[in-house]
Image: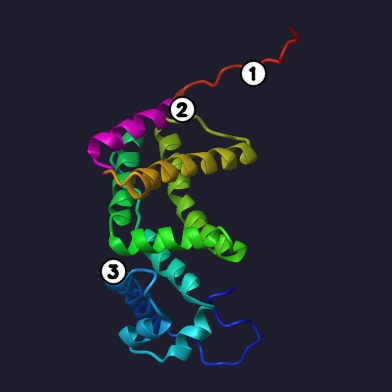
Amino acid sequence: MQSSTPAGRAGRPRSAAADTAILAATRAALVDLGWSKLTLGDVATRAGVAKTTLYRRWAGKNELVVDAVAELFDELELPDRGSLAADIEGVVLQFAAILARPEARSGLMAVVAESTRDEALRERIRTSIVERQKRLVLEGRARAQSRGELPPEPDAAEAARTADLIFDMVAGAVVHRTLVSAEAANGDWVRSLTQVLLWGLTSRPPEQTEPTDG
């Protein structure tokens, strides 16, 4: 399932203005109608485009909603507050604020639920949201290393695994806190999460020993 016109198919070039209007209309419809009542026809009317314009770009409602929500997460920026702890707190508070928005909350939970039986949709979520936002982890780690707050990681494969783990820990904790538990990710909670994360990043891991019999 692809959101763009397939390669080799003749047609007019995509309009960036139309894409922007469609994604904004999708978010507005999520606020007003929720995911279950959202239709491509309603989105087309709100965006002022023909319904065929949507079908040329998106295979269906799920893919459209993923892209509309992904655009919200593209607003995330890693602030430079002078320390790794402060930087983490800043971006986590931004993330929680986006998840508090009804269009992000309803859209994300709906497509994640749908993706449990749609591998193509799961991959779209992974590439459009997860992989794009890992830039924040890479940027924050590089900045902390340049400050001397974190040691360098010369092993590229290990560095990639660490980045994946950091992202999973932060994103998983915030999503669970805000969307599953429906609790506020306020300053106190974010500071506690940051302390736990920093302890794992700065502590020396225990030496691994071979298991012994008996």
Kind of element beneath mark 2: helix
Residue position for label 1:
208
Distance between the Cα atoms at labels 3 and 2?
38 Å
Percent x, y for residue 2? Answer: 57, 74
Work out how far the residue at label 2 is from the one at label 1, CA to CA, in angstroms: 16 Å
* Residues tagged 3 and 2 counted as in contact (Cβ below 8 A): no
**Element marked by disc 3:** helix
Residue type at mark 1: give it. Gln
Q: Which residue is mark 3?
A: 31
Give the residue type at disc 3. Val
Mark closer to the chain start, 2 or 1: 2
1 or 3: tag closer to the N-terminus: 3
In the displayed orientation, state which residue is furthest to the front: 36
Q: CA distance from mark 1 to mark 3?
A: 50 Å
Q: Which residues are magenta?
A: 184-200
Crowd class of label 1 (few under 14; some 14 to 19; many from 20; radius 10 Å): few
Q: Which numbered mark, 1 or 3, is in the foreground of this view?
A: 3
- The numbered dot on residue 117 is none
The correct choice, above or below, for 159 with respect to 130 in the image is above
> For mark 3, does the 10 Å Cα neighbourhood hold few (<14), some (14 to 19), or many (20 or more) residues?
some
The answer to whether any part of residue 127 appears in the image is no
- As helix, strand or loop, the secondary structure at mark 1 comes to loop
Residue ranking furthest to the right: 213
Q: Name the side, left or right, on which 214 lies relative to 50.
A: right
Give the main secondary structure, helix, strand or loop, of the magenta stretch. helix
Q: Which numbered circle lies on residue 200?
A: 2
Residue at image location 34% in from the left, 58% down from the top: 105
* Residue 55 located left or right of residue 80: right
Above or below: residue 6 compared with residue 73:
below
Q: Position of residue 136 (x, y in %)?
A: 43, 49
Name the quadrant containing residue 159.
top right
